[in-house]
Image (tube, helix red, strand yellow):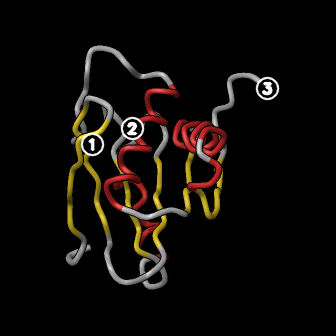
Amino acid sequence: MDAWKTFSCETNGITMHYTRTGGDKPLVILLHGLTAEGTSWTPVARELEKDFDLIMADARGHGLSTAPDQGYSYPDQARDLAGLIASVAMPPVALVGHSMGGMTAALFASLHPTTLGSLVLVDPSFLSA
């Protein structure tokens, strides 16, 4: 983790914080669950960083990202993710989302299918069919 760097970007009216492992490798964005923050992926990232450049993003209201009074719907979070992707990568990107992050990733995928190279959903919090 010593070589990992932290960054932020302005997206959808917030400042989104993220940690990046770096390197000239395929990019994977990791999205955390409701009670976590980006670096909760650290054990997974330690295993994957030799093969991938990983971004562990803090969702709005989590970690070091802005916590606005409102705007916590999945569409808001999907717009946040779109801004993050626009600021760090050329599509296609790989997304891995757990729980809330899985639902955010699934919604993003449905809205921006050509932006994705791959999608992994880990126990997503689907609220309806």
The residue labelled by disc 2 is: 80
Counting residues from the start of the chain, the first of labels 2 and 1 encountered is 1
Residue 43, x across and y down, in percent: 43, 66
Looking at the rendered structure, the kind of residue marked 2 is: Asp
The residue labelled by disc 1 is: 16
Mark closer to the observer (2, 3): 2
Give the SS element for disc 3: loop
Left or right, 24 with respect to 64, comes to: right
Query: For the view shown, which residue lies furthest in the top direction?
Result: 69
**Which image quarter: residue 105?**
top right
Inter-mark Cα distance, 2 to 1: 8 Å
Of the numbered discs in the image, which one, if any, rests on residue 38?
Answer: none
Counting residues from the start of the chain, the first of labels 2 and 3 encountered is 2
Q: Residue at x 48, y 76 (%)?
A: 26
Looking at the rendered structure, the kind of residue marked 3 is: Ala
Q: How many numbered marks, from 0 up? A: 3
Residue 97, x across and y down, in percent: 55, 49
